[in-house]
Image: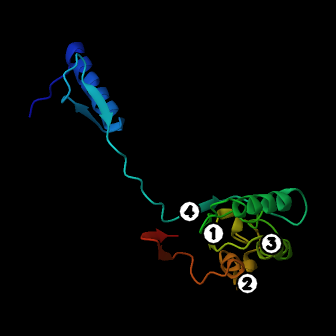
Amino acid sequence: MTNKILDRRDFLKLAGLTALGAVSACAPAQTVDISTPTTQPTVVPLPIKQKNRVLRIAHMTDFHVEPQGVSSAGMTRALHHAQSQADHPDFILNTGDSIMDALETSKSKAVGQWLTYNSIMKNENSLPVIHAIGNHDVWGWGVADASIKKDPLYGKEMALERLGLKNRYYSFDQAGWHFIV
């Protein structure tokens, strides 16, 4: 097999053809009407078939909510905004870091953060929520006391319980789409 090195002229030809292909692929479809004798053919755009959307998702992530501070108000505003859309989302996809940080905190502080999160979700949201666990949602991984590992809520277990999840990974189908969480 021989390796051909492109010279400047061949490179520019290839680059030009690539750019032309990319532009034409993005251009709307057109047809040229040559039935009428004119000096310039008439370009008539082809009708664009309208696609009906089958699913609308509000992607929300990194609430980092805690009992004190502004995060609770921000989470509430975000939920209200999603729900106030004229064409509201079919569900919220929460991709983690729901609470401020459970990695290096005490169990009582982690539980307090989850109570705040769950309270806001219950009182301020009417949409279904699909949850994923974020790294800040995992309790105790950064705690120096090794005995914490014996707690049944250690690691991702507390997040699973608080988010109402049976498994860390799951999938579901909706509106012809397959989601893996």
Residue 26 place in picture, x, y as percent: 36, 37
* CB-based contact (under 8 Å), mark 3 and mark 4: no
Instruction: Quote the CA–CA distance across marks 3 and 4.
Output: 32 Å
Residue 134 place in picture, x, y as percent: 64, 64
Residue 14 place in picture, x, y as percent: 23, 24
Q: Amino acid at mark 1?
A: Ile
From the image, which quarter does the N terminus lie in? top left
Q: Quadrant of residue 178?
A: bottom left
User: What residue is pinned by disc 3?
Assistant: 110
User: What residue is pinned by disc 4?
Assistant: 56
User: What residue is pinned by disc 1?
Assistant: 133
Instruction: Quote the CA–CA distance across marks 4 and 1.
Output: 22 Å
Q: Earlier in the sequence, mark 2 or mark 1?
A: 1
Q: Amino acid at mark 4?
A: Arg
Q: Secondary structure at mark 2?
A: loop
Residue 162 place in picture, x, y as percent: 72, 79
In the depicted structure, whether residue 103 falls above or below residue 151: above
The disc label shown at residue 151, or none: 2
* CB-based contact (under 8 Å), mark 2 and mark 1: no
In this view of the protein, can residue 78 be seen by the observer?
Answer: yes
Instruction: Quote the CA–CA distance across marks 2 and 1.
Output: 19 Å
For disc 2, the neighbor class at 10 Å (few under 14, some 14 to 19, many from 20) is few
For disc 1, the neighbor class at 10 Å (few under 14, some 14 to 19, many from 20) is many
